[in-house]
Image (cartoon, rainbow, N blue to C red):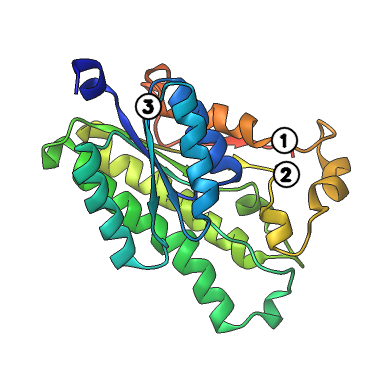
Amino acid sequence: MDKQELDRKVLLVTGGSRGIGAATARLAARQGWTVAVNYTTQASAAQDVVRQIESIGGRAMAFQADVAHEDQILRMFETLDREFGRLDGLVNNAGVVDAPQRVDGMSHARLKRMFDINVIGAFICAREAVRRMSTRHGGRGGAIVNVSSAAARLGSPNQYVDYAASKGAIDVLTLGLAQEVAAEGIRVNAVRPGLIETDIHASGGLPNRVRDLSPQVPMGRGGTADEVAESIVWLLSPAASYTTMSLLEVSGGR
């Protein structure tokens, strides 16, 4: 392996097989990152992202792990250590929504799934990233970008307050962790996407959600995964070297 390959920084993107995660993986690779593309079940989609990165001369590898399970997260990080030998960035993007429902109809099983994936999984991934990147632990420093949502401040009433609450927790993780590790070479920020054209809406039973709610957006349209990726990769980059503990709105003014 040549020096250039050894010097290439390594980024882990959870939920990297589709939507914002896939767009982030591709853009980061174009900017010189080696990318670990995490997926839960969509192996073929993750491999497609890897092939797209390799086709432009980048390096990437797919890593299976359901972030709802700590043992799978630990296995993923151990494999990453073995394959790449370093970690310089984490994008905590993996997340789910559920079918529209009022709070008075939500089951314990629904809530547990939501918070296991969207919150606890993000905490565990951040913990493992800090253990590798923090100068306190012998690391080189790095950056973490958490994918929150405009829902954290809007509440998503009558649709998915549980999802909004889970993203509110991500905001607090961002603010608290950023202060904990600022002196250890790690910057921690979040993006708050608004209405973005991805298939997460269909998975929650609202495939036309962006179209239906676009009139509420001051810019008059939904955003794209690529537009969110631009913000994430900027926050990972040296161009954002004095930016930490920030919640960046990528919501068209909504």
Residue 238's spot in the image, x, y percent?
A: 37, 19
Q: Quadrant of residue 104?
A: bottom right
Residue 174's spot in the image, x, y percent?
A: 42, 45
Which residue does the numbered mark 1 point to in the structure image?
223
Name the residue located 49 percent from the left edge and 50 percent from the top edge.
15
Nearer to the camera, 83 or 238: 83
Q: Earlier in the sequence, mark 1 or mark 3?
A: 3
Q: Quadrant of residue 135?
A: top left
Residue 212's spot in the image, x, y percent?
A: 87, 50
Q: Which kind of residue does numbered mark 1 sit on?
A: Gly
| Foreground: disc 2 or disc 3 | 3
- Does 158 sit left or right of 7 as displayed? right
Measure the C-alpha gap from mark 1 to mark 2: 6 Å
**Label drawn at residue 33:** 3
Measure the C-alpha gap from mark 1 to mark 3: 24 Å
- Does 29 sit left or right of 76 as displayed? right
| Mark 3, secondary structure of its residue | loop
**In the displayed structure, would residue 81 be above or below residue 74?**
above
- Labels 1 and 2 touching (C-beta < 8 A): yes
Q: Which kind of residue does numbered mark 2 sit on?
A: Leu
Residue 16 appears in view = no
Measure the C-alpha gap from mark 2 to mark 3: 27 Å
Which residue does the numbered mark 2 point to in the structure image?
195
Name the residue located 21 percent from the left edge and 44 percent from the top edge.
81
